[in-house]
């Protein structure tokens, strides 16, 4: 794995913030061996523009709350709300409308790159709670 510790921390935090806002199809791709400009892409989708923008806002707020207070150096695509890109240098976050996610298929474009595992902590807690209740 070529992602730095900071990139890994940012990617997981961004993915969790997206999951908290009900983002779909969240994927973290390690592009460090292929690109010199960033270590990882975080991909997320939402079925409408309003939710895309809510996810983007949640990611920005979440990364600002980290001890290192990460701020994006660039934010693009906000006006249309169909594909918003947040560039944190170490990671680049792509939040796309579901139609754009399917059409542009960034996952397929970067399919030769390894993915970084992400599990929504709320799902883990729900599974743990359900297992305890079943016993």
Image (cartoon, rainbow, N blue to C red):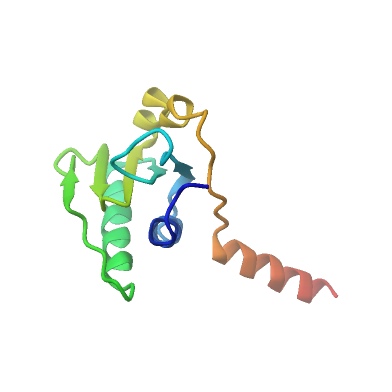
Locate residue 51 relative to residue 23 in the image: left or right.
Answer: left
For the C terminus, the image quarter is: bottom right
Residue closest to the far left: 79
Identify the residue at image location x=62%, y=70%: 125
| Percent x, y of residue 106 | 41, 30
Q: Quadrant of residue 67?
A: bottom left
| Percent x, y of residue 28 | 47, 46
Residue 36 versus residue 89: which sits nearer the camera? 36
| Residue 77 in the image: above or below residue 74 | above
Residue closest to the far right: 135
Q: Quadrant of residue 123?
A: bottom right
| Percent x, y of residue 129 | 69, 73
Report the number of discs.
0
Identify the residue at image location x=53%, y=42%: 115
| Residue 123 in the image: above or below residue 125 | above
| Percent x, y of residue 90 | 32, 52
Identify the residue at image location x=44%, y=57%: 8
Residue 112 versus residue 123: which sits nearer the camera? 112
Identify the residue at image location x=57%, y=51%: 117
Locate residue 62 relative to residue 25 in the image: left or right.
Answer: left
Residue 51 versus residue 57: which sits nearer the camera? 57
């Amino acid at each position: 794995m070529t992602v730095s510790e900071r990139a890994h921390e940012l990617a997981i935090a961004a993915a969790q913030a997206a999951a908290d806002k009900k983002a779909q199809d969240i994927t973290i791709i390690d592009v460090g061996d292929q690109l010199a400009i960033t270590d990882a892409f975080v991909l997320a989708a939402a079925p409408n523009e309003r939710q895309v923008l809510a996810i983007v806002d949640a990611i920005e707020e979440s990364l600002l709350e980290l001890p290192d207070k990460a701020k994006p150096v660039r934010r693009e695509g906000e006006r249309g709300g169909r594909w918003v890109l947040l560039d944190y240098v170490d990671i680049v976050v792509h939040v796309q409308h579901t139609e754009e996610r399917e059409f542009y298929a960034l996952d397929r474009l970067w399919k030769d790159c390894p993915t970084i595992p992400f599990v929504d902590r709320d799902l883990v807690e729900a599974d743990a709670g359900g297992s305890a209740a079943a016993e």
